[in-house]
Image: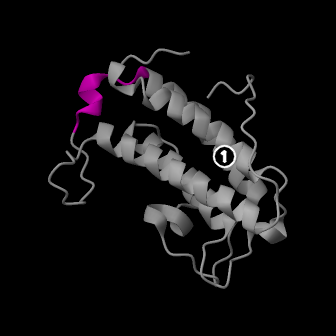
Amino acid sequence: MDKPKSAKLEVIIPAYRMHSQSFINVLDGITEEHARQRINGQTNHMVWMAGNFVNVRYGIAYILGLQEEDPYHDLFFMGKTLDEQFNYPSLKELKDSFYAISPKVYQRLLEVDDAQLAEIFKIDMNVPFVEENKLNFIGMCIGRQDYLCGQMALMRRILGYPGMKYEMDEQMTY
């Protein structure tokens, strides 16, 4: 396993890599038609969930100083509410964005140091036990991605797909 410069990220690195694999696995075989389906008009569709997942990766990139911009930022930033009037990207477009940003963020996670992670980053959650810094923002992003993968895995089953596989592609190093 790659060792990050900051020991504080030793838990984050494996989680990030697992989420990368889970993102690919959970979307495996999903048709574009099913990816845009909502359940009883109540749920987000899988395109929205995948888009929010990728947007979170761009959020991590931003706070780590990468000059990368999510091409679909306006649709997904801060978990923006799904709006059926919007023209959402395809799963392929979202996967392309995922493949573009994920290795860059991973590399930056390996390089960041404790001083950078301790820098103030206002999240405006107003939770007294959550220090608003870059490290905690990254931790919340990891939690968000875990949540989104779980939601997409549930949608797979509801839409009649087999459960998500947990096979690992050892060639994927991020």
Colouring scheme applied when the structure was drawn: one colour
Decide if residue 143 is on the left or right side of residue 135.
right
Q: Is residue 75 above or below residue 144?
A: below
As rendered, which of 62 and 144 lies closer to the eye? 144
Decide if residue 162 is on the left or right side of residue 123.
right
Task: Name the residue rendered at 17%, 49% in the picture.
Answer: 129
Q: Residues within 10 Å of mark 1 (few under 14, many from 20)?
A: many
Q: Count the numbered circles shown.
A: 1
Residue 1 % position (x, y):
56, 15
Q: Residue lying at the far left in this picture: please name it.
A: 128
Mark 1: amino acid? Phe
As rendered, which of 74 and 136 lies closer to the eye? 136
User: Which span of residues is magenta-colored?
Assistant: 111-119
Residue 49 % position (x, y):
61, 62
Task: Name the residue rendered at 60%, 60% in the picture.
Answer: 151
As rendered, which of 55 and 127 lies closer to the eye? 127
Task: Indicate yes or no whether the magenta region holds residue 115.
Answer: yes
Q: Is residue 167 above or below residue 43?
A: above
Residue 62 % position (x, y):
42, 44
Residue 105, visible in the rendered structure: no
Residue 69 % position (x, y):
53, 50
As rendered, which of 42 and 103 lies closer to the eye? 42
* Quadrant position of residue 168: top right
Decide if residue 121 is on the left or right side of residue 35.
left
Residue 113, visible in the rendered structure: yes
Image quarter hosting the C terminus: top right
Task: Name the residue rendered at 71%, 27% in the picture.
Answer: 172
Q: Which residue is mark 1?
A: 23
Task: Name the residue rendered at 67%, 37% in the picture.
Answer: 21
